Amino acid sequence: MGKLDPEQLEILLHIHQSQHERSLAHLNAIFNAFSLSVTGLMVLTAGVMTLNYIPANLKWLVVVAVVVVCVCIILYIRDQRQASERAIEIFRAIDTRLELFEKDKFLQGKSVLPQKYAESQPTWMGFSRRVDWLLVLPLVILALVIIVVTLQLPSPPPSP
């Protein structure tokens, strides 16, 4: 590839920085959504566990609410991950163009960035295999605990 002129370099560096910030914003949104949803589900778990009984219609309302919230948060996490990956692909392409993965280009015997950063992270069903599944699984487990506890609570005795 040809050498970049200063204007091209400035544009690439600006785009690189903005995409990096965009990716970090999406990752921050993932962790904020996870934290808030786990906090809310833990509060709901504590509330349900303190009840002696719960009317049948309220049981199903709690179950439906938990499922809807968990599905929405999980879909949100997936969408944020995909948006983050799109931004990462852009700045990864710029890193490649700037030859930051090339050994001996800027540092003797090393590349500025490790070669593994040049490759996309593996995903499954739109989630990263390492991080996102460590967030999704606790949400699912916590939701299942709430559902089981809620459905196990007795209904109130009929009024005379």
Image (cartoon, rainbow, N blue to C red):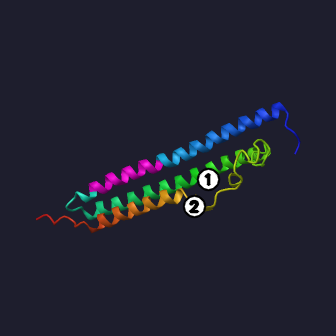
Examine the image and state in which quarter residue 148 appears: bottom left
Name the spot of residue 136 as percent of width and height, x first: 48, 59
Q: Give the magenta range.
A: 33-47
Disc number lying in front (2 or 1): 2
- Label disc, if present, on residue 129 of the rendered structure: 2
In this view, the residue in front, 138 or 105, is 105
Q: Is residue 41 magenta?
A: yes
Say whether residue 44 is left or right of residue 24. left
Q: Residue furthest right?
A: 2
Helix, strand or loop: magenta stretch:
helix
* Tag 1 secondary structure: helix
Compared with residue 154, is residue 24 higher up or lower down, i.e. above or below?
Answer: above
Compared with residue 137, is residue 11 higher up or lower down, i.e. above or below?
Answer: above
Residue at coordinates 70% horizontally, 39% vertically from top-left? 16
* Tag 2 secondary structure: loop
Which residue carries the number 1 mark?
Answer: 82
Q: Residue furthest left?
A: 160
Q: Is residue 3 magenta?
A: no
In this view, the residue in front, 93 or 51, is 93
Name the spot of residue 41 as percent of width and height, x first: 37, 54
Q: Hey, what amino acid is under mark 1?
A: Gln
Instruction: Count the labels in the image.
Output: 2
Q: Residues within 10 Å of mark 2 (few under 14, many from 20)?
A: few
Residue at coordinates 77% horizontally, 34% vertically from top-left? 11
